[in-house]
Amino acid sequence: MAIEDANYKFLYVNVGAQGRISDAGVFNNCNFFTALQSDVLGLPKPCELPNSSVVAPYMLVADDAFPLSKNIMKPFPKRNLSECQRIFNHRLSRARRVVENASGIMSAKFRVYKSPMALKNSSVKSVVLATACLHNFLRDRQIQSGTDSDDHVVVGEDTADELDEDEGKNSGGLLPMKSVAGRVSADAKALRQTLAIYFANEGAVTWQWKSTGLRCD
């Protein structure tokens, strides 16, 4: 499991869970989830969204594997969606492509990911963590030199379709996790709906109308 920033760099990597452990179990038992729940990550304070008086917290974009919360935003279920909700899902999908691309870029650079690793489990963990560190180092060098545009971006960013949860499998990226069961707070649902309305109005961008063919008043 990994968390990336907007520059395709890894901020957190969790490696080594046993294969028999469910994906939801890996997430619920990692130290990042504990720190997030305990509010000790030092996230920036909530602020107003651009061109709006709406105040929103900083959050991670995620897929259906993760629980919806004030700091983890995932798409609306794909049934009976309003136009605003469809736009929200599309915008969230565009942001999530960074996750797929980051792992795809790393696997393209390090050929050890092109085939099963004939190594001990402990060595595999070291290889994954080492390549993640090297990936971040190379990203920093590329950003500083202005050559980061040469990266092999795996998932296109101009498609109208929402990101397929299976795309990571084809790109060499990290596999999507199974859904995490649990009660979603009313505040988190309200925040997601507020963001959906914002993206369809004062937070709208021109390409979303071209991509979705929708308009929400």
Image: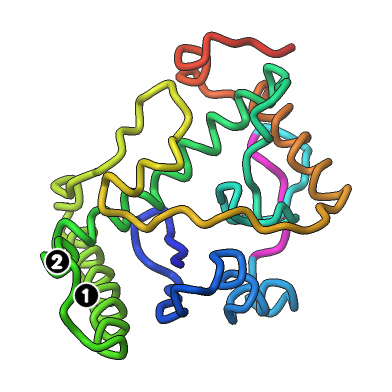
Q: Is residue 197 above or below residue 15?
A: above
Q: What secondary structure is the stretch in magenta mostly built from? A: loop
Instruction: Classify residue 119 by image quadrant.
Output: bottom left
Q: Residues within 10 Å of mark 2 (few under 14, many from 20)?
A: few
| In magenta segment, residue 45 | yes
Q: Earlier in the sequence, mark 2 or mark 1?
A: 2
The magenta-colored residue range is 44-50
- The answer to whether any part of residue 42 appears in the image is no
Going by the numbered disc 2, the residue's amino acid type is Phe
Q: Is residue 172 above or below residue 124?
A: above
- The answer to whether any part of residue 164 appears in the image is yes
The residue singled out by tag 1 in the image is 134
Residue drawn at x 46%, y 12% is 210
Residue 101 drawn at (x, y percent):
31, 49
* Front in this rendered view, residue 42 or 108: 108
Residue 111 drawn at (x, y percent):
11, 65
* Front in this rendered view, residue 11 or 155: 155
Residue 175 drawn at (x, y percent):
40, 55
Q: Is residue 204 left or right of residue 129?
A: right
Q: Is residue 154 left or right of residue 22?
A: left
* Front in this rendered view, residue 193 or 182: 182
